[in-house]
Amino acid sequence: MRLNWTKSNFLNWLLLGIGYILSPLSWWNDLFINLPLAYLFGCLFSLLSPRLFTPGIIAGYWLTNITGLLLIHLAALRFANVKRLNRRQWLINGLITAGYSLLILLLVMRRILKPFWLYHH
């Protein structure tokens, strides 16, 4: 019985940790996790059409953040005693996410950020 509780507790912390890293709550980690994942997402979409790179990278960034929030929510439900964020915290985190999205858009529009296989053209 104890082993089962330990596995469940470990899973809760794992979900919370991964969710936190992907979520807009860890804005400091975007440069190392979310933006590279979004970039790869954009690159994959650009294989279908080069015009899909920009929407793909923006969608990938938002998906990593949403996935992070969902994992945190799931962990909170599993712990059953994690407090919710207040509206101000959600607003601040949403503005940070929007700011990073604008930064991505500007970098793509200035052709600083593009699929890696197009850099030698």
Image (spheres, rainbow, N blue to C red):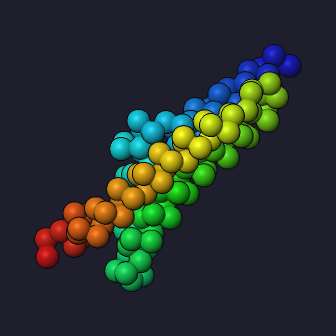
| 39 with respect to 69 (left or right) | left
Residue 82 visible within the image: yes
Residue 22 visible within the image: no
Q: Nearer the viewer, residue 13 or 106?
A: 106
| 55 with respect to 116 (left or right) | right
Residue found at x 45% / y 39%: 27
Q: Single out the residue that lies furthest toward the left.
A: 120
Residue found at x 41% / y 51%: 100
Residue found at x 22% / y 73%: 118
Q: Single out the residue that lies furthest toward the front.
A: 88
Q: Picture quarter containing residue 71?
A: top right
Viewport quadrant of the C terminus: bottom left
Q: Nearer the viewer, residue 91 or 5?
A: 91
Residue found at x 38% / y 72%: 53
| 116 with respect to 91 (left or right) | left
Viewport quadrant of the N terminus: top right
Q: Nearer the viewer, residue 3 or 121?
A: 121
The percent position of residue 57, horizontal first and vertical second, equals 42, 64
The percent position of residue 5, horizontal first and vertical second, equals 79, 22
The percent position of residue 7, horizontal first and vertical second, equals 72, 26
Q: Picture quarter containing residue 29?
A: top left
Residue 36, compared with residue 112, is above or below; it is above
The percent position of residue 48, horizontal first and vertical second, equals 42, 81
Residue 106, compared with residue 45, is above or below; it is above
